[in-house]
Amino acid sequence: MSTIDNLPPLREVIETHELAAKKSLGQNFLLDLNLTARIARAAGNLSECDVLEIGPGPGGLTRGLLAEGARRVLAIEKDERCMPALAEIADAYPGQLEVINGDALEIDPLAKLTPPIRVAANLPYNVGTELLVRWLTPKIWPPYWDSLTLMFQREVAERIVAKPGTKAYGRLAILSQWRSNPRIVLTLPPEAFSPPPKIHSAVVHFERLDEPKFEAEYKVLNRVVAAAFNQRRKMLRASLKGVAPDIEDRMLAAGIKPTERAEQLSVEEFCALAREVAKP
Ligand code: SAM
């Protein structure tokens, strides 16, 4: 397998440092450095950016990011066993890689990053979705990041980019598409990973918007969307009953038919409804 730097092939790194994949940490490693370089390229122009990488493992994507010219990479990895392998990469790129050994769900890396900041990660799927929701719902918008380039289970990626009127359309699509432009940039078969997972994967790239596409208060929008999709087969006048006692009037004021169902409403319509619900 060809290499993008002077470091040993990843298979050798894994053998040398005895990094047998742990299921409990969702470890499915990418071993093809051409592929990790492609993922790094999908993250955009990195030369002027700090990149936050979560879950570098043996460092395949880290090496891709550095070889593609990232100004600096800050990587957070939970598995202590990976530290010596990551230290070798730091030696090969002096001053450009800092690694924190810890849980990304508990560490706030902001103080160690200089804007502009891009995020890139191939994470266990449960951690990935949790972090995605956090990255999309900071207290203040715009967030600290300019883009996210993240690997997901293909089915989750399809939910993120789903359009109204489809089965995959729901909370994740609305949350993702309200304040960013997500698109699937790469799909990967199980064989791309070691060990291969049971499912296909996909890389989603999110470019954040400076302003949300449509005005709405996040808390209200989230409440409306959650109630609507909790009972997605019901008409909205039934599923949104608990949101406001006069919900039908508010729906009409927002230009929405109370007989519609959650999956028929566009992001714009959900935002219009959230604005009506927020009124006293
Ligand atoms: N990025 C590497 C690659 O592409 O080959 C590894 C990907 S593997 C799917 C996920 C990585 O995330 C593992 O190295 C695992 O140890 C790490 N990880 C799992 N949970 C984590 C957490 N909460 N915080 C930081 N890293 C975590």
Image (cartoon, rainbow, N blue to C red):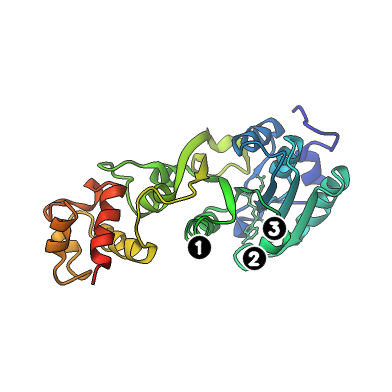
> In the rendered view, does 1 fall on the left or right side of 150?
right
Q: Is residue 79 visible?
A: yes
Characterize the local packing of mark 1: few (<14), some (14-19) or many (20 or more) Cα atoms within 10 angstroms.
few
Spot occupied by residue 128 in the image (x, y as percentages of width and height):
54, 54
| Label 1–label 2 contact, CB within 8 A | no
Characterize the local packing of mark 3: few (<14), some (14-19) or many (20 or more) Cα atoms within 10 angstroms.
many
Mark 1: which amino acid? Ile
> In the rendered view, does 216 fall on the left or right side of 242?
right
Of the 4 image quadrants, the one containing the N terminus is: top right
> In the rendered view, does 130 fall on the left or right side of 67?
left
2 or 3: mark nearer the eye = 2
* Residue drawn 40% across the image and 53% down it: 175
Residue bearing mark 3: 76
Depicted 41 relative to depicted 28: above or below: above
Give the numbered dot on residue 140. 1
Spot occupied by residue 164 in the image (x, y as percentages of width and height):
28, 43
For this rendering, which residue is in front, 67 or 20?
Answer: 67
3 or 1: mark nearer the eye = 1
Spot occupied by residue 8 in the image (x, y as percentages of width and height):
83, 37
Q: Is residue 109 visible?
A: no
Give the numbered dot on residue 108. 2
